[in-house]
Structure formats: structure tokens, C-alpha cells
Amino acid sequence: MLRTHQQATFAAMIITCTNCQHKTDHPENRAFTEEDSKTPCAVCGHTVKSIEISIDDSLLVKEDVMIKKIDPKLPSKKKVLSTTQSGDEYHRNSGTWQERTRIIDRENNLYYEKIENKEINFSKEVSEKLTDHQGHGSAKKK
Ligand SMILES: [Zn+2]
């Protein structure tokens, strides 16, 4: 079931300035560092940026996109303003692939999750205040 699929996996990272929408491609073979998160926009000097990471796995016909909005001026725990994740997720219990979107938006206090599994006819949509969501046992972290 589980394969090593390094060669077929393609990952791209695009950094977008949240002020002027200027886009920069991050070099594929280099990790995104603390220094990168602090680098101001080359056009307007703004430091709040959104980072889009997309993973394309041709062997597994799998796609995953993650967008993080980062304000490097905030302390590390509060730096990530929002995270949007969407893509294919493996559902262990049924052995099928499902589409999943998850948004954690601290700026607007929003938690959104949508799961759609066509193979087993399952769908679920949750939209609630992030503070309410974090109040539920399992998501609680200290
Ligand atoms: Zn800019």
C-alpha cells in the first residue's frame, strides 16, 4: 500500500505579498527559513506574506496545497495568521482517498473543515469559531 514516492513528488512554493500581491518563487531545493519569513517584499517592503506550498504526487495521483499567512513581526506562536489546507487525504478506516479542505483563520476566528469522500459516499462540513473549536477536548493544546 505505502510506496516510496520521492521521485514522483513535485513540490512548489510561491510567496505572495499580502499588500501588493507581488509573487516570488521560492527555490525548490532550499527550505523556507526564519530569515525568509522576515524578508520584506521586493516591491513594497511589506513583511506580511502568504506562502503557498503545493505538492503534486503523480504516482499516487495526489495533490496537496497549503497556504500560510505569516506576519514575521509577531512572536513565533502568533506569527501564523491563517492556514488553509486542501488536497487529498488518505482515510485509513475505509482505505480510500478523500478530498479535504481545512481553514484555521486566527485573524477572523474561523475554523472550517470540509471532507468529501466520493468512494464511500461521505461528506462533512464544519464551520465554527476557532475559539469554540479549540475548546473541544482533542484540539486543545497547551
Ligand atoms: Zn509587496
Image (cartoon, rainbow, N blue to C red):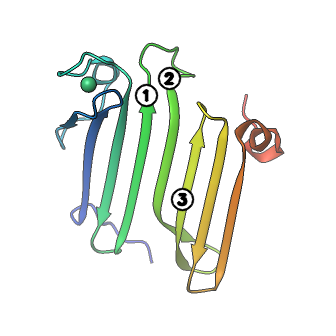
Q: Circle 3 sits on which residue?
A: 101
Q: Circle 2 sits on which residue?
A: 79
Residue type pointed to by label 1: Ile
**Disc 1 to disc 3, C-alpha distance:** 19 Å
The secondary structure type at the circle numbered 2 is: loop
Residue type pointed to by label 3: Thr
Q: Circle 1 sits on which residue?
A: 70
Sequence order check, earlier mark of 2 and 1: 1
Closest to the observer, 76 or 93 = 76
Q: Quadrant of ligand 1?
A: top left
Residue type pointed to by label 2: Lys
**Disc 3 to disc 2, C-alpha distance:** 22 Å
The 10 Å Cα crowd at callout 1, few under 14, some 14 to 19, many 20 or more, is: many
Sequence order check, earlier mark of 3 and 2: 2
Closest to the observer, 51 or 2 = 51
The secondary structure type at the circle numbered 1 is: strand
Q: Position of residue 12 (x, y in %)?
A: 25, 49
Closest to the observer, 83 or 1 = 83
Q: Which quarter of the rendered picture does the C terminus lie within?
A: top right
Question: Image point 34% across, 19% down: which residue?
Answer: 47
Residue 60 vs 11, above or below: the answer is: below
Where is residue 23, by image quadrant? top left
The 10 Å Cα crowd at callout 2, few under 14, some 14 to 19, many 20 or more, is: some
Question: Image point 65% across, 42% down: which residue?
Answer: 110
Query: Is the Cβ of the residue at disc 2 closer than 8 Å to that at disc 1?
Result: yes
Mark 1 vs ligand 1: CB below 8 Å: no
Question: Image point 32% across, 53% down: which residue?
Answer: 54
Judge left or right: residue 69 versus residue 36: right
Q: Position of residue 95 (x, y in %)?
A: 57, 80
| Residue 87 disc label | none
**Disc 2 to disc 1, C-alpha distance:** 6 Å
